[in-house]
Image (spheres, helix red, strand yellow):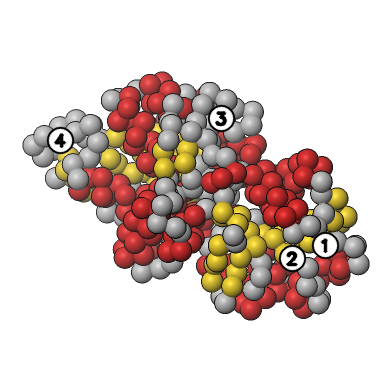
Amino acid sequence: MGMFRFNRALARQVAGAALAVCGVAGFGSAGAQEQPIRIGAFLSVTGPAAFLGDPELKTLELYVDRINAEGGLLGRKLQLFSYDDAGDAEKARTFAKRLIEQDKVDVIVGGSTTGTTMAAMPLAEQSSTPFISLAGAVTIIEPVKKWVFKTPHTDRMACEKIFVDIKARNLSKVALISGSGGFDKSMRAECVKVAPKYGMDLVADETYGATDTDMTAQLTKIKGSGAQAVLNAGFGQGPAIVTRNYRQVGLALPLYQSHGVASREYIKLSGPAAEGVRLPAAALLVSDILPAEDAQKPVVVAYRKAYEDKFKSDVSTFGGHAYDGLMIAVNAIKAARSTDKARLRDAIEATKGYVGTGGVVNMSAADHMGLDLSAFRMLEVKDGNWSLVK
């Protein structure tokens, strides 16, 4: 029996280096003579976006092992090839090239950030390799690329969901503050673009750098701008700093964050200053308080239990994006009854009614994500936890 084991502790000591291949079992045993189905992933497991990549990798490992334990797929085992790009776009491109040319993967599920995804996307297109990204920016799927799909809600959807909520509070003057990363810039641009559609008047537009540790200057300007609400487009530690500084400069206006910080880590980093902050996120974060009749409840409850039982840590929507990416690929392989790349691509594009952690997915030739605004839930931090805004 061929068996490769993943050494997480060692891998994390070598940021940017290839992570070991994992989750392969059963080669050479009776009934498993066929080549494994090769799943490729490049993820930001270390570095500033580790809060994205770490749960994504854990999720892929967990469910590849589970599928193999249940007999595999089409009578074949799954083999996961995973590399840590540490959030570096150049490394992501190098690893994507290795996945395609050396590892000869059948499909790629990965790309934790918009920057790493955008760097690898041309390689997937040139090599005709199905690629399901786990990153947020709408530019990944607009315009549509033949071989590229994504699972998370887009930044444009986040802007729209937030503006709908602001409008429901009878407010219309909004201040923007955003980071300098790929996702941050893309979301800021999308918010500027759709603001008029929702009657929003953008009265301030401030930015901060990736390594900034104090945003009080920008927030002081916003305080004097006449804004009625503030929207922070960003992910990583920046939004937590914005949240703490927000209270320190005496701002009491409604503060909105993006789905890029939809994890308990954001609440922990922000501390009491996070109370009252709202953000659009997947149902996964509030799985325990979803109504029993909610179509997503069985899926998100099961995923949350499996993840938290295995890793003894809080679930996040980011791991959920990896779950959805893998399951969409698995369902497409079943539908195509093949790993032929063209047939697999067509089957992914034909995904209809898939109920995942991110919502109900209905893809088409014109929509390589398949989610609408109903997939987003508006959450608010109350008593140090997520609550559902009704």
Q: Nearer the viewer, residue 172 or 133?
A: 172
> Disc 3 to disc 4, how far (Cα)?
36 Å
Q: Nearer the viewer, mark 3 or mark 2?
A: 2
- Label 2, label 4: how far apart the Cα atoms are: 57 Å
Q: CA distance from mark 2 to mark 1?
A: 7 Å
Q: Secondary structure at mark 4?
A: loop
Per the model, the C-alpha gap separating discs 3 and 2 is 33 Å
Residue 81 % position (x, y): 36, 43
Disc 3: which residue: 367
Residue marked by disc 2:
254
Circle nearer the N terminus (2, 4): 4
Q: Which mark is residue 32?
A: 4
The residue singled out by tag 1 in the image is: 228
Amino acid type of the residue that numbered disc 1 sits on in the rendered structure: Gln
- Locate residue 104: give its quadrant: top left
Question: Of discs 3 and 4, which sits in the foreground?
Answer: 3
Q: Amino acid at mark 3?
A: Asp
Residue, far left: 30
Q: Where does the image place residue 96, in percent across and percent down from the top left?
A: 48, 38
Query: Considering only order in the chain, which callout, 1 or 2, is on the residue closer to the N terminus?
Result: 1
At label 2, counting other C-alpha atoms closer than 10 Å, the crowd grade (few under 14, some 14-19, many 20 or more) is some
- Sequence-wise, which precedes: disc 3 or disc 1? 1
Q: Spatial distance from mark 1 to mark 4, Cα to Cα?
A: 62 Å
State whether residue 369 is above or below residue 6: above
Which amino acid does the dot numbered 4 rest on?
Answer: Ala
Which residue ends up furthest to the top in the rendered image? Answer: 342
Q: Quadrant of the N terminus?
A: top left
Do the numbered discs 3 and 1 sit on residues whose CB atoms are within 8 Å? Answer: no
- Mark 1 vs 4, N-terminal side: 4
Q: Element under label 3?
A: loop
Q: Residue at x 50, y 42 (%)?
A: 151
Q: First in sequence, mark 3 or 4: give its number.
A: 4
